[in-house]
Amino acid sequence: MKLFSKEQIYQGDAFTVKAQNITSTELMERVGIQIFNWLHIRMQGAQVPIHIFCGIGNNGGDGLVVARHLVEHGYNVKTYIINYSKTRSKDFLINYEALKNTTKEWPTMLDNSDHLPEIHPNDIIIDAVFGIGLNREVDAWVIDIFNHFRASKAFVFSVDIPSGLDTDKVPENPESVVNAGYTLSFQTPKLVFFLPDTEKYTVQWEAINIGIDEAYIKSTETQVELIGKNEVLPMYQPRGKFSHKGNFGHALILGGSYGKIGAVTLASKAALSAGAGKVSCYVPQCGYIPLQTSFPEAMVVTDHSEIQITDVQLDFTPTVVGLGPGMGTHENTKAALKSFLATNKSPLVVDADALNILAGDDSLLKLLPELSVLTPHPKELERLIGKWTDDFDKLKKAKNFAKLYKVILIIKGAHTITVFNDKLYVNTTGNPGLATAGSGDVLTGVITGLIAQGFDAVQASLFGVYLHGKSADLKVEETGYQSLIASHVIEGIALAYLDLFKEPERPEIEEVEDKK
Ligand SMILES: NC(=O)C1=CN([C@@H]2O[C@H](COP(=O)(O)OP(=O)(O)OC[C@H]3O[C@@H](n4cnc5c(N)ncnc54)[C@H](O)[C@@H]3O)[C@@H](O)[C@H]2O)[C@@H](O)CC1
Ligand SMILES: [K+]
């Protein structure tokens, strides 16, 4: 799914109005009805007090449409206008009049935070104060109102985006942003819902289809894309009846050191489970027996050192190399890695200690073949791109790094983000169970296994990150977060593949029609 920037949302809005021959007021009505329906289906007429706080722009206008429909359906509604500016939007004014014609209980004007309404913990707050039009700091008295929301402990439902949150900045003062329990985002979610610094402003979110014109959605290139099942399914490569192991490549996992052979075992098992035709491991001699015993499907080639990689000698050209699991950063290993990179011609997936060896060494980074995949966790990323001030700064630095070295950078986290060619691909699978030793080795293996069987590096990255997270999502139902271990994630790859072809369940819902 494409994630539009703020500018693109405004353009999409204008495009839709023109292409569908409707007015902006009709579009706002359509949006308001969608939000109302969402609430009505869940509330079924319950008389819980609903406090709707509206700003004076179009986000406030949406709030007024919702208020009108709730009033018309007999809900217990109180509407307030947070009067932070005299410049009201046209559609705000139209809907302000429409609400006044619907109820005798006119909206309460709030010009300061002196006498704020009482809100009880079991009430509901609808937050339609600021939307994506936020363009300056929030006034202190409006922050007081947001603090009043928090103090009330009432459930907060935000329209489009938690008010006070920018679409492209991390807020300096967390109190200037509403803490939403649920956000209904228009058409697509916002990037800020996925970043560690800003995801906390909404506990849950959902995107509602407000009917932005299909032609606009199709033709507009975005800088951010959300990767879910719909995006990875077309990448799936079916297998022909007459295919044989030679069709799916020969992956090599290069790594391991004394005490860290498990990392290679995990990565190589994952590569084979993801569908590589053959897997070999290149490890120090201490890895020979454990690998041959615990993973008979793999072939093992050893370094002449007992305990670390010191010299890489291969008598075949691997289709792809997964580089770094458990490798350590010993000087001898660094030297071996350097001479390996100088002559290597195979595509690379680089992780763990190989990243630590590369970090800060421009001459080594330049030896990476184009489209190498790098899979750092946050500490490794910092060693590669330097410290960042906030998530947006991190993404900018990551893009610059990926461009400079022509690589694919996979920033691992709750929402893993793949950075390539100035674009961000945000993954939607995975859970906190993945915060466990070895899960990164499994990811390296999965991506290596995908490249081995013919996926291009970008697709292997996106598909691999998705499969890895999905596997954890399916396995965690048996294990719980605490007990999920990397070996479970390998087992789950099979389930994640099968899940690609499961039909989603469709809930049956009754909705109020948009008569326009
Ligand atoms: N295509 C879409 O996505 C649609 C969007 N609509 C709504 O329109 C919203 C955007 O509306 P607007 O552009 O009118 O802006 P907002 O309603 O988000 O912002 C309010 C206005 O306040 C001013 N302002 C910004 N920051 C301020 C601050 N800190 N203190 C005081 N005033 C401030 C701005 O000049 C802006 O016009 C969206 O978030 C959404 O809710 C819908 O009505 C229609 C369809
Ligand atoms: K809002």
Image (cartoon, rainbow, N blue to C red):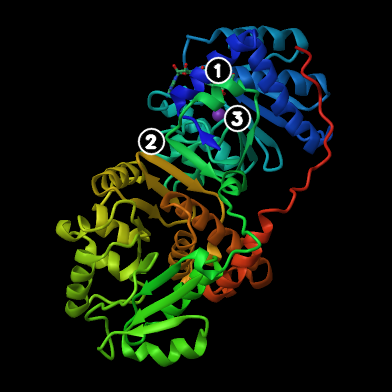
Q: Depth-wise, is mark 3 or mark 2 nearer the camera?
A: 3
Q: Is residue 354 above or below residue 63?
A: below
Residue 268: x %, y % from top left: 46, 74
Dot placed on the residue nearer the N-terminal end, 1 or 3: 1
Q: Is residue 20 left or right of residue 379?
A: right
Q: Which residue is mark 3?
A: 187
- Along the viewing direction, whichever of 7 and 446 lies nearer the viewer: 446
- The N terminus is located in which quarter? top right
Q: Is residue 102 above or below residue 418?
A: above
Q: Depth-wise, is mark 1 or mark 2 nearer the camera?
A: 1
Q: Residue at x 51, y 64 (%)?
A: 248
Q: Which residue is mark 1?
A: 13
Name the residue type under label 3.
Gln
- Along the viewing direction, whichever of 212 and 136 lies nearer the viewer: 212
- Along the viewing direction, whichever of 146 and 371 lies nearer the viewer: 371
Label 2 Cα neighbours within 10 Å, binned few <14 / some 14-19 / many ≥20: some
Disc 3 residue: CB within 8 Å of ligand 1 = yes
- CB under 8 Å between discs 3 and 2: no
Instruction: Find residue 206 and report its image quarter.
Output: top right
Label 1 to label 2, Cα distance in Å? 22 Å
- The C terminus is located in which quarter? top right
Task: Identify the secondary structure beneath mark 3.
Answer: loop
Name the residue type under label 1.
Asp
Q: Is residue 57 left or right of residue 33?
A: left
Dot placed on the residue nearer the N-terminal end, 3 or 2: 2
Label 1 Cα neighbours within 10 Å, binned few <14 / some 14-19 / many ≥20: some
Q: Which residue is mark 2?
A: 169
